[in-house]
Amino acid sequence: MVYHKSTVQLYTGNGKGKTTASIGAALRAVGHGKRVVIIQFMKGRMYGELYAAEKIDGLSIEQYGRDEFVNPEKPDPVDIELAKRGWARVEELVEKGEADLLILDEINVAVAFGLLTVECVLDLIDRRPEGMELILTGRYAPGELIDRADTVTEMKEIKHHYQKGIESRKGIEY
């Protein structure tokens, strides 16, 4: 078996659990003294993980989005601007090597909706410092990112409680 200091993991698919899986990886890394930064694209509401991160040394979560859905056919200019701000922060983290684990939450959706380009993500994968683990999450992962990632997990929806009319619940879905 070959040991590598870092890999690229990608969590995609239409099922529930992509962000949750990445947060589990974040907790594991923090437990071993690693610095973890989660950049959430297209999210701007108080999810429970934000409250938890405030209490955990070594874990930082930053949001670059609004509390509204992004129109995939015609994103609002503010959504594009927020994604660009988030990407600028990602560039800063990579340039300064300020994270051992960098999670780009909903990056696949941001790319699919045209807020960012797949080329910038591919370039980041190539330029990240040695030892910086990278996790990419979100539906609609482009083939180029699937091909480049070392580990790809697809969350497949079999059924969902939304189909029964059960809405998002505080502390469970957000």
Image: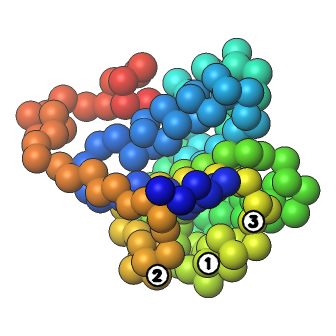
Q: Residue furthest top?
A: 55
Query: Which residue type carries mark 2?
Result: Glu
Which scheme is used to colour this image of the protein?
A: rainbow
* Disc 1 from disc 2: Cα separation: 8 Å
Q: Quadrant of residue 174?
A: top left
The residue under label 3 is 128
- How many marks can you see? 3
Nearer-the-camera pick, 22 or 108: 22
- Indicate which disc, 1 or 2, sits on the residue closer to the N terminus: 1
* Disc 3 from disc 2: Cα separation: 17 Å
Q: Residue furthest right?
A: 96
Query: Could you tell me if residue 77 is visible in this image?
Result: no
Point out the frontmost of discs 3 and 2. 3
Residue 159: image location, x then y, percent = 10, 43
Query: Which residue type carries mark 1?
Result: Leu
Residue 15: image location, x then y, percent = 25, 49
Residue 98: image location, x then y, percent = 84, 48
Q: Which mark is residue 144?
A: 2
* Residue under the image location 41 percent in, 55 percent down: 11
**Element carrying mark 2:** helix
The residue under label 1 is 122
**Mark 1 surroundings within 10 Å by alpha-carbon count, few (fewer than 14), some (14 through 19), many (20 or more):** some
